[in-house]
Image (spheres, helix red, strand yellow):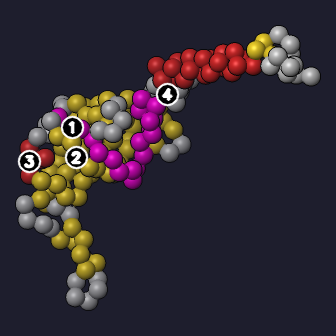
Amino acid sequence: MIIDKNARLFGKINIIDFFLILALIGLVAFGAMQLRGGGAFIGGETKEFILSFFTEETYAFNTQGINIGDNVFDHVLGNYLGTVYNLEVGPSVVWNTDRYGNTVQSTKEGFYSMTICVRVVGTPSEHGVLVSGNRYGVGIGRPIRAGANAIQVRTSALREV
């Protein structure tokens, strides 16, 4: 029998001690993976990319608080992404329907659109790029911190430098 009447595994190891040792090994493995960036790009070659983030509508103060050279972080995960490489500000992009039911693009007074290009170092993957073990791909929406501002953006382009 594998477990005897004294709750020993194979008659030698207490089953409670066995599970505690397994949990300890799991914690050590988890900690090692976190220190290595989640283990997402072990063995992968890192390259430099330009990630473009776009927001259709933001306040004027957000356009003034971000500058070329500012550090950029993922606001939720806290990961450092890179630095602002280029910044474009334009009129806001608002989609409405006209009286005929057609979807038309217009603008909203006092609001602006922004494209923030960020130079990042990551590992190419099947669906984008892995930066600090987290995947960034075109179409993914997330809040970022650039300079002194936090802003909700969507990844609009990804290209290798």
Inter-mark Cα distance, 1 to 4: 24 Å
Residue 161 shows up from this direction: no
| Nearer to the camera, 44 or 25 | 25
- Does dot 3 land on a helix, a strand or a loop? helix
Quadrant that contains the N terminus: top right
Residue named by callout 1: 146
Quickly name the residue at label 4: 38
Asked if residue 64 is positioned above or below residue 84 in the image, the reply reads: below
Q: Are marks 3 and 2 in contact (CB under 8 Å)?
A: no
Q: Is residue 143 magenta?
A: yes
Tell me if label 2 and label 1 are in contact, CB under 8 Å: yes
Stretch in magenta: 129-147
Residue 74 drawn at (x, y percent): 32, 37
Please provide percent x and percent y for residue 99: 22, 88
Instruction: Determine if residue 59 is in view.
Output: yes
Most frequent secondary structure within the magenta stretch:
strand
Marks 2 and 1, the one that precedes in the sequence: 1
The disc at residue 61 is 3
Of the residues shown, which amino acid type is indicated by label 1?
Answer: Ala
Secondary structure under tag 4 reads loop
Residue 23 rendering spot, x and y as whole percentages: 62, 21
Residue projecting furthest to the top: 12
Whole-Å distance between the Cαs marked 1 and 3?
13 Å
Q: Which corner quadrant of the image does residue 79 belong to?
A: top left
